[in-house]
Image (spheres, helix red, strand yellow):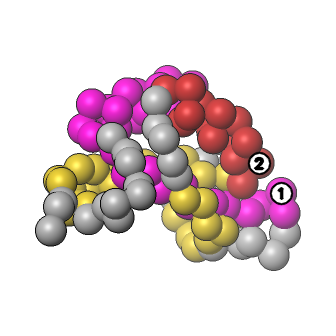
Amino acid sequence: MTFRTCKLLTIFTEAALEKTLIRDIERLGATGYTISDVRGKGSRGLRNSSWEPNSSIRVEVICDQELAEIIVAYFQEHYYANFAMTIFTVDVTFYPSVSLQIL
């Protein structure tokens, strides 16, 4: 069984940023991502997906440590000051299928 240890980069942010973030993620080197609509409450208040301007997304990227750090630094520099955004990484063990090539 083939596996590798990598990072799961998770970004919670405003849905209005989706297209821009995806463009940035791909330009910075990620080969794939998953996006989910989410709702919850944090330091910037309640984020409810029932009203489009107030909706939130979760973007997940499986990548190596170096790419995770590049994406985090870029997003902190370009988005943190003006948008609701939380980013974290966790170590994951990735078991790719034969047809899936990442990293």
Q: Residue at x 41, y 57 (%)?
A: 99
Q: Position of residue 4 (x, y in %)?
A: 18, 54
As drawn, is 61 to the left or to the right of 25? left
As drawn, is 65 to the left or to the right of 37? left
Q: Position of residue 59 (x, y in %)?
A: 54, 55
Query: Helix, strand or loop at disc 2?
Result: helix
Proximity of marks 2 and 1: CB atoms separated by less than 8 Å: yes
| Depth order, front residue of 3/38 | 3
Q: Which quadrant of the rendered structure holds the N terminus? A: bottom left
- Number of labelled discs? 2
Span of residues in magenta: 52-80
Q: Is residue 4 magenta?
A: no
Query: Helix, strand or loop at disc 1?
Result: helix
Measured along the vertical axis of the image, is residue 16 above or below residue 75?
below
Of labels 2 and 1, earlier in sequence is 2
Disc 2/disc 1 C-alpha distance (Å): 7 Å
Q: Are there few (<14), some (14-19), or many (20+) residues within 10 Å of tag 2?
A: some
| Depth order, front residue of 41/73 | 73
As drawn, is 101 to the left or to the right of 7? right
Q: Are there few (<14), some (14-19), or many (20+) residues within 10 Å of tag 1?
A: few
Instruction: Name the residue that disc number 2 marks.
Output: 16
The residue type indicated by label 2 comes to Ala
Q: Position of residue 38 (x, y in %)?
A: 62, 71
The residue type indicated by label 1 comes to Pro
Q: Residue at x 63, y 39 (%)?
A: 21
Instruction: Name the residue that disc number 1 marks.
Output: 53
